[in-house]
Image (cartoon, rainbow, N blue to C red):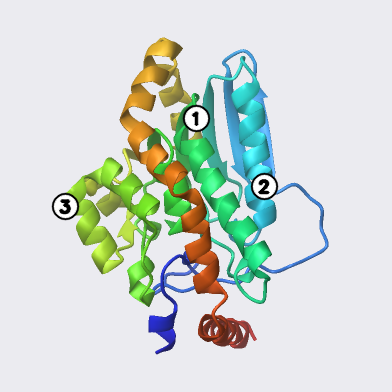
Amino acid sequence: IVNSLLLYYLSIHSRHGRECVSPCFSLQQRNSSTSPKIKVDLDNSTGVAVLRMQSPPVNSLSLDFLTEFCINLEKLEMDKSCRGLIITSTLSKVFSAGLDIMEMYGKSPERCGEFWKAVQEMWLKLYGSNMATIAAINGSSPAGGCLMSIGCDYRIMADNPRYSIGLNETQLGIVAPFWFKDTLVNTVGNRAAELALELGLLYSAPDALKIGLVDQLVPEDQVLSTAQDTMSKWLAVPDHARQITKSMMRKQTIDKLLSNREADITNFVSFITKDSIQRSLRMYLEMLKSRKA
């Protein structure tokens, strides 16, 4: 019953640097460091910014991480000299492992609502960005990490069969939110999305390419350089034409969340604060800690 209780909006982490037979959460360790979780370098000569996620051990999407991510994205959006954005990771073997489980355990309803609103905001800012966006996926990217990747315009992944990507929520009895689903449908088509979501599939890099979940595979040491080369092709298109076309393709999906945003937050908070769910999360955290020990 523990697995069946973990329903609805949670995202799943993969164990850092290891393959999992089944999906599993990972625990983002807390420390007192104030080091930035995001590093942004903007090349004014090309108009391309590289956003590097640098929050060990697995770039978990905590509230602090999401807030910092959104602030940086907004700054770049307002900078007229920035036309393109490449998102990548500084960590070995992982792009992002998804939502931080500690944001969902032992928190007040108000805090849970703030967290889920930040998850929404990350997706809204990225999926609706006027910039050309490329995910340079240099490691595994399950659940929330996959959502971030498919929020971009183009995905380049390291050609390593040990790296995986996908919305694997149903493997633990979890239902991906409607806007996760809509983004995946827009990326791979209805039938491929149906199979991926119902079976909770994590695709190896080669298989992700086959279904169109990623657009290109390159050697691991060439992911960023290929993204930079590819960006020049995107920026060769006049900005206004590309932006209007992007909006035309994505507006309906974005508007659907905007019109249901508060209800989506309410549903998440109502679910995650249930005593039964909190007990399940506690059991899962204890299991992770015992494995680590």
From mark 3 to mark 1, how far is it between C-alphas? 27 Å
State whether residue 148 is above or below residue 19: above
Q: Mark 2 = which residue? A: 67
Q: Quadrant of residue 173?
A: bottom left
Q: Mark 3 = which residue? A: 191
Q: Is residue 131 visible?
A: yes
Q: Quadrant of residue 59?
A: bottom right
Q: Secondary structure at mark 1?
A: loop
Position of residue 283 measured from the top left corner of the image (x, y, whole percent): 56, 87
Rendered residue at 60%/60% (across/down): 113
Q: Are marks 1 and 2 in contact (CB under 8 Å)?
A: no
Q: Quadrant of the C terminus?
A: bottom right
Rendered residue at 61%/88% (across/down): 290
Q: Secondary structure at mark 3?
A: helix
At label 3, the amino acid type is Arg
Q: Mark 1 = which residue? A: 129
